[in-house]
Image (spheres, rainbow, N blue to C red):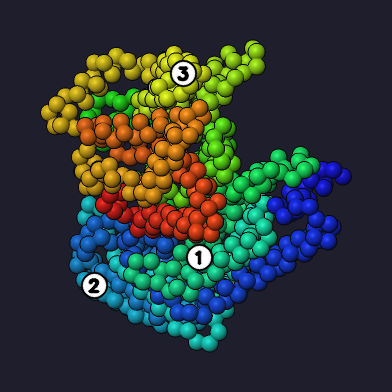
Amino acid sequence: MGRSSALLQAVRGQEATRPAGSSSHQRLIDQLWLALLVVPFLAWLMIVAGYQFPVTVNEALAANPSPLSFRGVYPPEAGAFGFQRWTTEQAQIRVPGVGSAPFEVRLRFFGPPDAPPGRVVRLSSGAQVLAEVEVRHGRQEVWVLVPAGLGDPVSGDFGLNLEVPGFRVADDPRLLGVSLDRLTLASRQQGVVPPPSGMALQLGLVALLSLLALRISGVATRIALGLSGLLCLGVGLLVAGGGSTSIALRLQAALALSVLVEVLTYALVLALILRLPDLRQRRPTPNAQALTLLRLAVLLIFVFRLAGMLHPQFINIDHGLRANQLLLIADGQEAVVRERLEQQYEWGTREPVPYSLVTYYLLLPLTVVWGSPFELIKAVKIVTALLEATFPLLFLALMRQGPQRMWGAAWGGLIYAGLPVGYLFFHDGSFPTTIGIWLTLLALVALQWALEPAPQGQAWFRWSSAIMLLGIAIAAYVTHLAFIPFLIVAIASSLFFLGESRTRRQGLILLPAVGLAFLVGWVIVYRSYTITLIQRTIPAYLGLIASEGSVGRGSDSFFGTPINSFPEHLAAHFRLWPVMLAGLVLIVLVGNWRNRFITHLGLGYAALLIATSVAEQWFGLWNKHMVFIAPLVALLSGLGCAWLWQRGRAGRITVSLLLIWLFWQSLSAWGNRVLWYLLPPGAL
C-alpha cells in the first residue's frame, strides 16, 4: 500500500507534494485525464488544419542529403549536365507527407547524347499512368497533373515511378535510364483535404508521450499541457508552411514525426527511471522545482541529441565509420583499426599520432547484440545520447559544496542542451569525444569526493578511485593527454594560491595524484607509442612549426574553411553570452567562495581555455578544446541564470529570452549539419 501511494504521488508530480486534501488530489487527477483527452484532439485538429493549406516542393534530385527517398537510382555524381542522379530502368521518387490533394508535378531530367534514339519514359503513380514522353538529347521538363487520391492515405507520401529502357556506355558497367535534375510539386487545394491518418496518429502519440514524460518529471499539468500543445501547434505550422527552394516544411514534419515517436518513447522510460528515487520519499522533496528542472534538462539533452542524429537526412559519415571499426575490433582486427586512426591528416603529417581505443572498448558489448553496421550505428547513437544526457546529474555532483547547488546544475543542464557545439565541425554525437568528456566529468566528481574529509579507512579507496578514473579519462582521447593534466595542475595551483590552509594542502596532494593518473593513462594506451613519439611524431611536428609556422591550421583540411580565431570560436560554439555570463559568475565565486571546489574547478577550466587558445596559434586544435570546456561553461552560466531567475519578472524574462535565442541558434546549426550539410564560415 505504501509503495502504491508513493507511485501515485510520483506520477502526480510537484503539485501532489503540497499539503492538500483528497479533493485537491482528485482535481489533479481530473486535470490529467482531461489533458490526456484534449491533447490527441488538438493533434488531430492541427493536422487537419495544416493540410488545408497548399504545399510547394522544389527539390534538386541530385542533392545529398535529401528529404526525398529514392529507389532504383544511383548515388549522385558529377557529369556532363552538372551534378546528377542516374536512374536504372525502373525507379521511384517518393515525396513524404505531401497528402492526397491534386498536384501539379514538373520533372526535369537529361537525356545523354550517346543514348539510343526512340526511348520512352513512362511516369506513373501506383497503377495510374500519368505521362509517356520520348527521351530527347539534352534537358527536358515534363509537366503532369496528378489527380486527388494518389497519395498514400496513411503516410501521405506520394510516389512517382519512372520506367525507361536502359542503355550502357563505354567503360561503365551500369544500366542507365535518365539523368534526374529537379522535381517541383505544387498542390491544388479543392475542398476539404483529409489528412493522412498515419501522421495524425503519430502526432497524437508525440503529444501524449511528451505530456506523460513531462508530468512524470514533475512538471505541472497545465504547463505540461501547454508545452504539448505548443508542440502540436509547431507541427501544424510546419504542415501548413508549404515550402521554398531551400526547405519544404511539410516534408520535414513528415520525417520528424516517426523519429519523435521513437525518441519520446525512450524518453518516457528515462523519465520513469529519473523519478524512481521519489518512490522512497514519504515527505515532500526539498527543492522539488529545481529537481523537476534538472530532470527536464536530462530529457531535453537526450531527446535533442538523439532525434537530431536519427533524422533520416542525417548523414552517417563518422558514425558509420566508427561502427565498422567497432565490428573490426570485435572480429580481432584491432591493429588494422589502430593503424588507420593513427593517420590524423588534419595535423599535416603522415607520422603516426597516438590514438586511443578506450572508448571503443566500452562499446564493444554492443557488437554482441547488434552485428550489422546499420543496427550498431543506431545503438551507438542511443548510448552516446544517454551518456551525454547524464551531464546535468554530473553537474549536480560537482556542485556538492557550491552555492545554488540544485538550481545551478538544472540551469546549467538546460544551457548545455541548447549549446550549438554539438552540431559544429560535424561533432555530432561522435562517441570518442562525448564518452571522453563524460569520463572526464566522472573523474572530476571522484576527485572532489577524494578531497572531502573521509571516514577512517576510506581515504585510500577514494583516492585510488579518483586516480584510476583520471587515468582512464586521460587515456580516452589523445588531446586529453595534455588537457586533463593541465586542468588538474591548474586546479591544484588555484587551491594552493587562493585557498585557505586546508585547501592549500589539497592543492599539494593533487600534484602527485595527477602524476600517478598520467602514468596510469600512459600504461593503458600510450606506452607502446613512446619510441615513436620521441623519434618520429614530435620531431615531425616541431619541424612543421619551424618551417611553416604552425601545424593543422590549413584551410584545405576541412572543405576550405579556415580555422577560427578566438572570438569566432566563442561565437560559433557558445553564441557568446554563456561564456560572458560564466566569466562573471567565476569572478563572483573567486570573491566569495574561495573554499568551494567549484570555484577552483572553474579557474582551472578558464586557465585551460586561455592556454589552448594561445597554443592554437601554432598547433591547430580545430574545436577540440571548445568541446572539452563546454560542460563547465554551461554549469557556470547556469549559476548565473539561477541568480537572474530569482531577481523577479525582469530576471525571468531575460533568462527566458536568452535560452530561446540559444535554442534557436542550436536549431540553425543543426539545420546546417543535417538539412543542408553546409559548413558556414566560422563553424570550425
Q: Is residue 384 above or below residue 158?
A: above
For the point 67% across and 55% down, which residue is it? Answer: 215
Judged left or right of residue 457, residue 248 is left
Residues under labels 2 and 1: Cα distance?
31 Å
Label 3 or label 1, whichever lies nearer to me, is 3
Q: Residues within 10 Å of mark 3 (few under 14, many from 20)?
A: some
Mark on residue 571? none
Q: Are marks 3 and 2 in contact (CB under 8 Å)?
A: no
Judged left or right of residue 314, residue 543 is left
Q: Amino acid at mark 1?
A: Ala
Judged left or right of residue 482, residue 111 is left
Pointer 2 residue: 139
Q: Is residue 533 above or below residue 29?
A: above
Mark on residue 504? 3
Toward the left, the furthest residue is: 547
Front-most of 498 and 22?
498
Residues under labels 3 and 1: Cα distance?
59 Å
Q: Secondary structure at mark 2?
A: strand
Position in image of residue 84 (x %, y %):
28, 61
Toward the front, the furthest residue is: 591
The total number of labels drawn is 3
